[in-house]
Image (tube, rainbow, N blue to C red):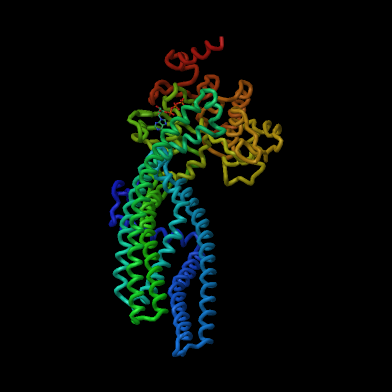
Amino acid sequence: MAKNRNTISIENISFKDRLTSLKNLPDFFKLVWKSSPSKTSISFILRLLRSAMPVALLYVGKLIIDEVVSLNSHIGNGDLQKLWELVALEFALAIVTDGLNRMINLTDSLLGDLFSNYTSMRIMQHAATLDLDQFEDSVFYDKLERARQQTVGRTVLLSQVMSQIQDFISIAFLLTGLIAFNPWLILLLLLSIVPSFLGESYFNSKNYALSRSQTPERRELDYLRYLGASDETAKEVKIFGLSDFVIGRFKMLSDQFYADNSKLAIRRSGWGTFFSVLGTLGYYAAYGFIIYNTVIGKSTVGSLTFLAGSFRQLSSLMETMLSRFTIVSQGAIYLNDFIDFFEIKPKITKPENAIPFPNPIQTGFVFENVGFQYHNSTRWANRNLSFELRPGEKLALVGENGAGKTTLVKLLARLYDPTEGRILLDGKDLKSYDLDDLRHNLGIIFQDYIRYQMTFYQNIAVGNIKEIDNQQLVKKAAEESLADQLAAKLPGAYQQWLGRKFNDGIELSGGEWQKVALARAYMKEAQVLILDEPTAALDARAEYEVFQRFAELTKGKSAVLISHRFSTARLADRILVLDQGTLLESGTHAELLEQEGRYAELFNLQAKGYQ
Ligand SMILES: Nc1ncnc2c1ncn2[C@@H]1O[C@H](COP(=O)(O)OP(=O)(O)OP(=O)(O)O)[C@@H](O)[C@H]1O
């Protein structure tokens, strides 16, 4: 797993940490730019123009007032024509400012949507390259969850950073004016905003620490929400009367959340009020100073309005900028999670100079003393496994729950690599073959296959997505798995939406779903077919028919069948009996019965149930 950028202590995020986190912004801007180069440029230009507006408006205002005063005075050297021109200019500036504001909002919101879509796609693309065991790691999941949150939350960061740049330029303009008139005012300005900045900064870091430490609980809350109110869980929740249990746990967690968050929010609000009073004090001190200077004739009335206006705007802009800095830097710290996620690299990858998958397979697969341990477990799911799967051979895996049958299949598909030992294909390590090619040549249907909330047609076509438009192939696959008969009964036939989530979909029975899933395995010209509990939900007749066809369809192909039904397992050329991850017995049905070992025991147990 990638080195974690989050070396920052969660409890305490210092000012330095905040500054350091700003180094994430270039990466962030690269993503923004890639989301839409044209809109990013437009947004930047608009903000540049907008940043000159405050000082321009204030300065024209000053000229207007000075002109009015001079027209009213006894000396009377004012120019009425010039005055109206100035008013017209101020009016034009006000209109342009308003227009720029609207255009900026529009560009930001469009750019935000594009950014959110782009980053969501990037997350899915990257997640697709990662290993299965990375998905099974809760630390990884938290990271993925936080990265997902970034896709929406970061659009806010985008406009915040842009506004920051805009305000920075505005401040530069206003400061130039202020310094030209009276540099001392700068000192008062700083005094009025620093306390409020420090307060903001402190509470933002507390907020971040709190929200970060709550990630696992937040995931649990989401899960409980799903458990408590979803079509998939409603059945069991009702039967077991779980709703009070689920709601109770939800309430306990959410109350804890609320208590922690509200405590912080109240403290923050109290201190915020205090600092804002300090800021107002600073402003009135400066205001008094400017008024005094005007009264004693050191500056004009126009300058009074310009300076007071500049001071007020500067102090409010700086305050906004500084408090926004804490939001921006906090956003930049959150970006760590986002960038971390993209730095996670898969371990199971296509090797350089990968060998193409053999067609046809020559000598088959060989497991050489293979052992596998899930990364989050100390138990061996498979150990000391040595056997062959020859070309064209049908192998059945039997064994009690947890014996390691599914794990063995996952190793064959390189969803995991063995912890010890190796798997060979035609005498070469499986790791040296092209990964996509390997998976394309295996037709696997897992026990926990997905019930895609899509059309009947798409549910089958996903078995070989490159052939999604090949209607004949989909039809053929459906016929082979007996799903075709089901399509004939559906109102929308192949275009019938399945599942209840969308478009008035129809829910299928467990066995019907299984036939649809089975058709996926027939979508590819796979050289090895692997079915993990393929008929568990089928009725006796359907099971018989499915296997009649399976035998015909896999003639000459290798196949691995995992089944708890011995009627299925006995059809195989060879049966491997697994026990606690190891190979206990191996042979044909007849041989194993003769051995009177575990297979014979389990077979007789099942047979007795039918007598
Ligand atoms: N993702 C996982 N992470 C950790 N341990 C796992 C994981 N999947 C399976 N195991 C463990 O590995 C062992 C073998 O599991 P496996 O699914 O291969 O058994 P199986 O023989 O297919 O069982 P069943 O007949 O119930 O489907 C079990 O002890 C199981 O608890």
Q: Position of residue 425 (x, y in %)?
A: 43, 38
Q: Is residue 548 left or right of residue 17?
A: right
User: Which quadrant is home to the N terminus?
Assistant: top left
Q: Give the residue at x 35% y 67%.
A: 284
Residue 441 seen in the current view? yes
Above or below, comparing residue 82 to residue 153 in the picture: below
Number of numbered markers: 0
Q: Is residue 558 visible?
A: no
> Within the image, what quadrant is residue 259 found in?
top left
Q: Position of 50 compared to 210: left or right? A: right
Q: Residue at x 37, y 58 (%)?
A: 323
Q: Quadrant of the C terminus?
A: top right
For residue 160, what is the image quadrant? Answer: bottom left
Tell whether 34 sits left or right of 139.
right
In front here: 475 or 220?
220
Nearer to the camera, 132 or 298: 298
Q: Which residue appears farthest toward the front when viewing the image?
A: 74
Image coordinates for residue 194, horizontal then vertical, percent: 30, 61
Residue 184 falls left or right of residue 125: left
Quarter, ligand 1: top left
* Image position of 336 with respect to 320: above or below: above
